[in-house]
Amino acid sequence: MIYAKERKRNMKTDIQIAQEATMLPIKDVAANYGITEDDLELYGKYKAKFSDEFMNSLDEKPDGKLVLMTAINPTPAGEGKTTTSIGLAQAFEKLGKKSVLALREPSLGPCFGIKGGAAGGGYSQVVPMEDLNLHFTGDFHAITSANNLLAALLDNHIQQGNELRIDTRQVIWKRCMDMNDRALRNIVIGLGRKVDGYVREDHFVITVATEIMAILCLAEDIKDLKARLAKIIVAYDVDGNPVTAGQLNAVGSMAALLKDAIKPNMVQTLEHTGAIVHGGPFANIAHGCNSVRATKMALKLSDIAITEAGFGADLGAEKFMDIKCRMAGLKPDAVVLVATVRALKYNGGVPKTELVAENLDALKKGICNLEKHIENLQKFGVPIVVTLNAFETDTEKEHEFIRQFCEERGCEFALSEVWAKGGEGGIALAEKVMETIETKPSNYAPLYPDDMPIKEKIETIAKEIYGADGVTYSPEAEKAIANVNKLGYSDYPVCMAKTQFSLSDDRSKLGRPTGFKINIRDVYISAGAGFVVALTGNVMTMPGLSKKPAAYEINLTDDGKIQGLF
């Protein structure tokens, strides 16, 4: 394969490729889309936010086509959603189609934890890669600050007389930080003197799992942002009534902290295609999609907008369809489903260390994971293109088997070589996506209606998307669902918090598990975001670091160059 030869010849890390690339000033990239320097708020030469005036000026422009990028369940073997998204956008540009990416911002937790950077890979990257993976334009810091300001105002209200009669045993708002730190999952605050506050148990979550992150990504504008912030439930009073951020007079100050963070960011790919990178909620805890504002901007600026949803299609894509599209009035025209030969063999029972050898038997066993995701996406009425992110160890027989498998199930298929070749390696995929958009209608519809009861929504997702036989509920979850119904939130969509590594809630069950039930351990209302969260299995809202975290490999040289960031 050409891909193999090129990769062996180069053998450069992602960060080396990114640092050797020549970036254009972001104002020049923006000019290709009819955006003037006055429309931008520059963050140095290569990053910018859009002015509110420019965003408002786009309202009357027609929308382009919307393509969602998703994948099979993640494995240690790798899949490559972001890399494929970037390569596909670059390929459309080579075909003469104006394309804009709408991507998520990476969290510092995974960057320093298990995976390193999250800006694509090889010759399909977004740059400046180091900035994007680290502090970028400070959006996540602003979200963290707004979240913790609300926590401080809540505890201060209790300290200063507690006029709202908050039950300190029913404080549900959690502090956050954008880093994996298991020691902060369960803590005690208020120790010390009387002036140091009331002693109570508290918790930290990672910033990308917070309701503030979800709100920022779903808000249409500042007015909508403030309305959503006001609805956040922070605690319950002694009578069991919800206490909100609005009641704590926290909305104005929180909105002030988020003034710039709500504005989408523009950067570029290695081939100078425009990328709007904004927001980054976890898909196994929050809704896993970039901001509505970024996606709608990409649609206004392009012929074809490409966005992605986190983790496998059972998480990110389901939430994209059932939460983001439902709320924002979006209608995807096509879905690209990414897989790799290696990941499918891993699902077929092959250890990570033995994935390089051709193994059609393992592929036949593991392809059931891809099959289930195809079936799931078809339930939303959107046409599907399956693509294989190519590796040098793949064989023609393996590719051909997967191609035939997909085509037998009514899906188009294309090989992607964007890691090695950039946009050139994505032309075959781009042509398939264009053909699909032009010849196959999208009949998008969410999986369930708004007025379906909460339990039925949970069970619909569990049975239809995960393949479960049913659902079990802990006593805490039963009580919480009763409270959801009592408070009038039963018409909200459900955001299922589940492990990303399996279709089930047990990460060890690969392929297409059967004969299992989804276990709901708790449910809570994200009233500002506009959905009800159902926690399954042992999914964590504050991850921990591994024995050898990615942070060990990251360094800053004496001349100021970052190394080891993927």
Image: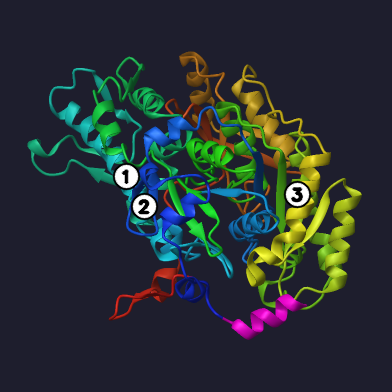
Q: Nearer the viewer, mark 1 or mark 3?
A: 3
Sequence order check, earlier mark of 2 and 1: 1
Q: Which residue is mark 1?
A: 144
Q: Is there CB contact under 8 Å for labels 2 and 1? A: yes
- Mark 2 Cα within 10 Å, few/some/many (few <14, many 20+)? some
Which type of secondary structure does the marked residue at label 3 adopt?
A: helix
The residues tagged by marks 1 and 3 sit, at their Cα atoms, a distance apart of 38 Å
> For the point 35% across and 52% down, which residue is it?
137
Q: Sequence order check: which comes first, mark 2 or mark 3?
A: 2
Q: Is residue 455 above or below residue 259?
A: above
Q: Report which quarter residue 321 is drawn in.
A: top right
Query: Looking at the image, which residue is at 71% across and 56% down?
Result: 95
Within 10 Å of disc 3 (Cα), the crowding (few <14, some 14-19, many 20+) is many
Q: Residue 378's quadrant in the figure?
A: top right
The label nearer to you, 2 versus 3, is 3
Q: Position of residue 405 (x, y in %)?
A: 88, 55
Above or below, comparing residue 381 to residue 451 in the picture: below
Secondary element type, mark 2: loop
- Going by the numbered disc 3, the residue's amino acid type is Val
501 left or right, relative to 389: left
The quarter of the image holding the N terminus is bottom right
Residue that mark 2 sits on: 178
Q: How is the image coloured?
A: rainbow
